[in-house]
Image: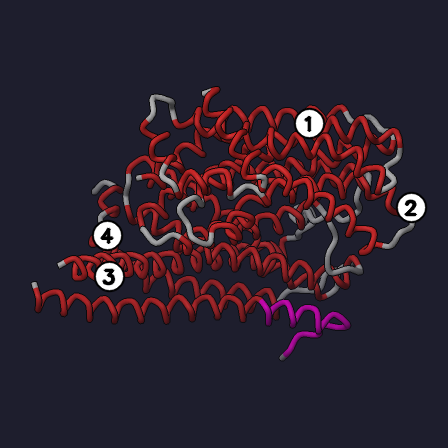
């Protein structure tokens, strides 16, 4: 059920592909960093509690 | 204040770097352009005013990180901060010293370099006028960038990245004045805009630079 | 009703966003998917632009967010400078990369669209040029954040840069307008789509804009939480080293 894009198919599809890739990349990087920092903070906090 | 200005000027002369280096860089840029675009004098005449503006801007950029760096390293910036002078005045004097040692020589050299690039004869007056009006803004904006990056180890590259976008309005109007002058068009509007930007920047930006410097000296 | 400033407390901010973030994320995904599918599959081609008109659903929302992200950073910077709330400074820091990506999307989709319509990927049209300059401002802002080690110093300096940058971005916008008119009188590259957008394109476009706004909010909330945690972590580590 692909719509008929005519002679501009490449143009439209590449615009969508580029945008979606960029957005997904940004979301992914944000999520990975969020998880990473959350885990590291927990480590540091438990260590600080033990000492403190 | 005047003592500070004289001191800065003397230092720039003695160190040699600040004074001659910008000019030499300007000359090199102007020399390299014909190698890049070809030696046709008709083409050079068209782009001469733009190249001269761009060269002056880059030469100005080159010496920005020296505005505060030396004083920061030997601690005299901390002394200046505790002096009775307000920080805004210190920043303004620094910008003025930078303009006298860098901007002014560039303005004076531009007509000579214009000869090299086959600048049309009616282009000299608007070019010099636009540079006189525009280069103070370059120094003041550059001082702001230098104040932001003063404490950083590798501040030079970052400084360019921060300052160059801020140079856009000045460059656009300055080059437009020169270009319209060459084409024999009326260049009153861009001239007024250029002067307006320079005056506005001189009046307002020292406050931002002083704020940034205070943060960095904290 | 609690005061807005309560959310300036990092702990309170994290607690509240714990509840809000899933909703915003889900809503943004729903709106984006619905809007883009509606736009891509169920709108007719424009009689002049053919199927390329479908790019509008990405181009216009991303361009809008590119500017709004900077405005949000400006407000957040002002709040930081006046009221010294860490969350505000960190939110500005969190928003910058999102704004950068939005600007990039607007530029890229515009270039891809420009190729068949104007016969060139890039023209020094005022709008294109202003967006390129905006992109440079984002780069400088992010670079300054990452160059300074001390959190408060970085927040102060980037806030000042954001204020000054806003003024210069506005100046550049007018300068660029002036500059291009000076070059080609009556440039024929009209980018003003709002005038010709018909209802068929308008409603899916609105949904896409809503989707992009929600996406921006969700990303900024998520990234601000990350920055809050990173800041706390650095503080704990510093204390450990001292003690």
Tell which tag, 4 or 2, sits nearer the viewer.
Answer: 2
Tell which tag, 4 or 3, sits nearer the viewer.
Answer: 3
Residue B41 tag number: 2
Dominant secondary structure of the residues highlighted in magenta in the image: helix
Q: Chain of mark 3?
A: C
Q: Chain of mark 1?
A: B
Q: Residue furthest bottom?
A: A1
| Left or right relative to C184: residue B88 | left
Which tag, 2 or 1, sits closer to the chain's start? 2
The mark tally for this picture is 4
* Vertical order, C109 against B4 (above or below): below
Q: Residues within 10 Å of mark 3 (few under 14, many from 20)?
A: many
Magenta span contains residue A11: yes
Residue C233 tag number: 3
Name the residue located 64 percent from the left edge and 37 percent from the top edge. Answer: B169
Q: Chain of mark 2?
A: B
Q: Which quadrant: the C terminus of chain C?
A: bottom left
| Left or right relative to B210: residue B191 | right
Name the residue located 46 percent from the left edge and 39 percent from the top edge. Answer: B68
Which residues are drawn in magenta? A2-18
Q: Are marks 4 and 3 on the same chain?
A: yes
* Vertical order, B132 against A43 (above or below): above
Residue B132 tag number: 1
Q: Is residue C21 visible?
A: yes
Q: Which quadrant: the N terminus of chain C?
A: top left
Name the residue located 20 percent from the left edge and 71 percent from the top edge. Answer: A43
Q: Which element type, helix, strand or loop, lies under badge 4? A: helix
**Alpha-carbon distance for marks 4 and 1?**
50 Å
* Residue that badge 4 annotates: C10
Name the residue located 51 percent from the left edge and 44 percent from the top edge. Answer: B65
Q: Chain of mark 4?
A: C
Query: Between residues B169 and B37, which one lies in front from this camera angle?
Result: B37
């Amino acid at each position: 059920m692909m719509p008929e894009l005519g002679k501009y198919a490449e143009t439209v599809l590449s615009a969508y592909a580029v945008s979606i890739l960029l957005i997904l990349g940004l979301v992914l990087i944000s999520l990975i960093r969020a998880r990473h920092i959350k885990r590291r903070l927990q480590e540091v906090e438990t260590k600080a509690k033990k000492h403190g | 204040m005047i003592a500070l200005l004289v001191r800065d000027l003397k230092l720039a002369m003695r160190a040699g770097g600040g004074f001659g280096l910008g000019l030499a860089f300007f000359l090199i840029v102007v020399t390299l352009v014909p190698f890049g675009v070809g030696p046709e004098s008709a083409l050079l005449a068209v782009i001469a005013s733009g190249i001269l503006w761009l060269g002056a801007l880059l030469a100005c950029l080159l010496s920005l990180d020296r505005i505060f760096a030396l004083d920061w390293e030997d601690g005299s910036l901390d002394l200046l901060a505790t002096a009775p002078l307000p920080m805004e005045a210190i920043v303004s004097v620094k910008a003025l010293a930078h303009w006298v040692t860098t901007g002014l020589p560039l303005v004076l050299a531009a007509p000579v370099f214009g000869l090299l690039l086959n600048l049309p004869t009616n282009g000299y007056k608007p070019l010099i006028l636009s540079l006189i009006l525009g280069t103070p803004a370059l120094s003041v904006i550059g001082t702001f960038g230098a104040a932001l990056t003063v404490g950083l180890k590798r501040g030079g590259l970052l400084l360019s990245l921060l300052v160059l976008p801020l140079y856009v309005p000045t460059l656009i109007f300055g080059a437009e004045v020169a270009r319209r002058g060459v084409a024999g068009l009326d260049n009153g509007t861009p001239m007024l805009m250029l002067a307006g930007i320079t005056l506005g920047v001189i009046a307002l930006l020292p406050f931002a630079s002083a704020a940034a410097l205070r943060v960095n000296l904290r | 009703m609690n005061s807005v400033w309560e959310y300036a407390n990092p702990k309170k901010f994290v607690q509240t966003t714990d509840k809000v973030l899933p909703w915003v994320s889900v809503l943004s995904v729903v709106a984006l998917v619905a809007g883009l599918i509606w736009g891509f599959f169920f709108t007719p081609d424009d009689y002049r632009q053919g199927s390329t008109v479908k790019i509008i659903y990405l181009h216009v929302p991303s361009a809008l967010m590119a500017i709004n992200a900077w405005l949000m950073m400006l407000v957040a910077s002002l709040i930081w400078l006046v009221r010294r709330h860490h969350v505000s400074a960190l939110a500005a820091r969190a928003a910058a990369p999102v704004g950068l990506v939005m600007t990039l999307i607007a530029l890229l989709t515009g270039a891809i669209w420009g190729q068949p319509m104007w016969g060139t990927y890039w023209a020094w049209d005022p709008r294109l040029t202003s967006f390129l300059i905006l992109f440079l401002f984002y780069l400088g802002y992010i670079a300054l954040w990452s160059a300074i080690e001390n959190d408060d110093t970085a927040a102060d300096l980037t806030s000042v840069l954001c204020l000054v940058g806003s003024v210069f971005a506005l100046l550049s916008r007018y300068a660029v307008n002036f500059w291009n008119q000076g070059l080609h009188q009556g440039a024929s590259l009209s980018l003003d789509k709002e005038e010709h957008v018909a209802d068929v394109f308008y409603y899916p476009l609105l949904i896409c804009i809503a989707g992009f706004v929600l996406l921006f909010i969700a990303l900024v909330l998520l990234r601000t939480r990350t920055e809050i945690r990173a800041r706390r972590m650095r503080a704990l580590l510093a204390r450990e080293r001292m003690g």
